């Protein structure tokens, strides 16, 4: 069965508006990244929202959990802003869906040359195929269980809580 | 314990010589890729050789197997040219080392903007952390057991033999 | 004699702070661009300021004019934010320095893959070598006299006033 | 009147074939470069040939000269492989066409991230607008008269003969 990729926005998909000089969201670049990686894993891509994770509400998280619960797939990647990725991971973890769900994101927009997005996507797609049911954050080449992960706001690096 | 990354060359690390117009090898770009991916998995990088895999000899493969057997690490990534990756995987598989060994590579040199190298490296590092002992090829987002993988020469895509 | 390149900041030199998600200035990328262009025109690079041109004050412009007047070189390139480039061009034009001065900039930061900066720099360096004394804006492949240029704020394109 | 851009191939337009690992020609990337530079100079692009300049024959050069003579435009940019650019410049120079003709190229293919192509194109388009009738080579930020230029084969840099 295909892997389902839910898009929620985050730095991953931000673009630079050359008229205003602001970062903004247009469409996801997921298919472009998968093409660049010559990906051959069957995937379905569904955009749930395109937002900065600092603006993600409880209702947004309920929506994400609901979609993860309702879909037929039991291997799911969720792209997400890094600032509150741990909170969404906790909501998904508490839902105990008996699926393998991997959240990932990027520190630098894909459209900027120096992005970590392609690396993180490669690792997220690998972890979601090889890890047992559970909710994980895949960042910086590592994976973390949902109940033991946080973003270090000073360094931008994901780490265990305990 | 750290993951050991053995470098053997391949398209991954090829560069363009602007004087001669030829592709050639200088140094590996592994650390540059890991930096771009903001990798935080502890790794050791060792360059065994820098060659096109079409020129890899039986002696070269013996050397690779020997290093995989002799090292202390039991999780190993081997970067390799794609053309004969399946042969080296078979040699490593037959050696039955009781380690998790993942071979990966790229269809386009990392230094060319359109490379799949960062995606493949992200997936290889993830698979090597999460798969049981065995020898695998990680390409195109997928992983293959060493005894059931080949590169489709016409399409450049890795696939099962049977 | 060398061409003098004065750096004042602008989108050209903006970078992405991956911790805060904000654009900011660190150092100029001028040498990096010149290296990429394999530039062999003798140049001197001097950073006068590193600011967004929307924040450029009358005092800043006086400083730029003063440096252009005082320097020994009579061929000068000034990198500048695009939003108020026309105003600085007018100040330089009114100063009637009897030098060839070319202002240029970029719509997208150099560090983002899609930047027009390298193209604009190539054209600015060419115009400064080949145009007679005067003050010009070089953007979008074109050059404009200082008294007849404005940035179209809606399209981001430079055009004649009349 | 528009500037005419004649495409003849050269490193500029080479691509990497990821199946064979060879460099080859497909289509010109000229429009892509002009878009990246946000070019607003009216241009017409005509592909005359797509060849490595080491393989350019006398007949090919006659064809280039013929097209430069026959076209209505009197400002022409010719993209060209660097290895024999000086020879084509000489043929064009001897033809004494009373037009401004600028030959340019690249040391690294545009599709590889590190290309000088965008810089050279920016400078060529600027020189062709601002130099008097004559035949020039625009490389490395500089311009050379057709009768006094050669590529230094060891360094890859263009220089005066005398």
Image (cartoon, coloured by chain):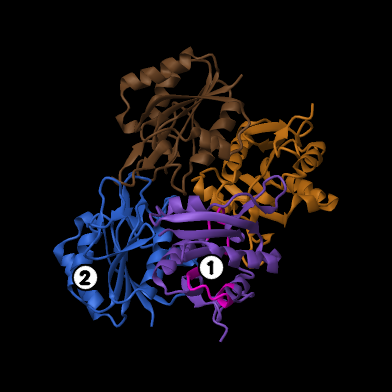
Chain colours: A brown, B orange, C blue, D purple
Q: CA distance from mark 1 to mark 2?
A: 33 Å
Q: Quadrant of residue C119?
A: bottom left
The answer to whether marks 1 and 2 mark residues whose Cβ atoms lie closer than 8 Å is: no
- Neighbor class of circle 1 (other Cα within 10 Å; few <14, some 14-19, many 20+) is many
Task: Please give the residue where the numbered disc 2 appears in the rendered image.
Answer: C92
Q: Quadrant of residue D89?
A: bottom right
Residue D119 position (above or below residue B137): below
Residue D103's disc number? 1
The x, y position of residue D63, in whole percent, is 63, 64
The magenta segment: D92-115
Q: Nearer the viewer, mark 1 or mark 2?
A: 1
Query: Is residue D111 on the magenta stretch?
Result: yes
Residue B156 position (above or below residue C35): above
Per the picture, the main secondary structure of the magenta-coloured stretch is: loop
Q: Quadrant of residue D154?
A: bottom right
Residue furthest right in the image: B58
- Residue at 64% x, 50% y is B12
Looking at the rendered structure, the secondary structure element under dot 2 is: helix
Looking at the rendered structure, the secondary structure element under dot 1 is: strand
- Residue at 52% x, 33% y is A31
């Amino acid at each position: 069965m295909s892997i389902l990729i839910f898009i929620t926005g985050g730095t991953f998909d931000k673009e630079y508006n050359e008229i205003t000089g602001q970062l903004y969201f247009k469409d996801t670049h997921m298919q472009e990244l998968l093409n660049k990686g010559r990906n051959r894993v069957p995937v379905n891509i569904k955009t749930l929202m395109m937002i900065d994770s600092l603006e993600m509400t409880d209702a947004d998280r309920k929506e994400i959990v609901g979609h993860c619960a309702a879909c037929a797939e039991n291997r799911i990647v969720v792209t997400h802003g890094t600032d509150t990725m741990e909170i969404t991971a906790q909501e998904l973890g508490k839902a105990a869906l008996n699926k393998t769900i991997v959240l990932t994101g990027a520190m630098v927009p894909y459209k900027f040359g120096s992005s970590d997005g392609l690396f993180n996507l490669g690792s997220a797609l690998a972890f979601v195929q090889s890890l047992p049911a559970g909710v994980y954050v895949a960042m910086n080449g590592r994976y973390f269980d949902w109940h033991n992960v946080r973003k270090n706001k000073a360094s931008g690096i994901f780490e265990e809580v305990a």
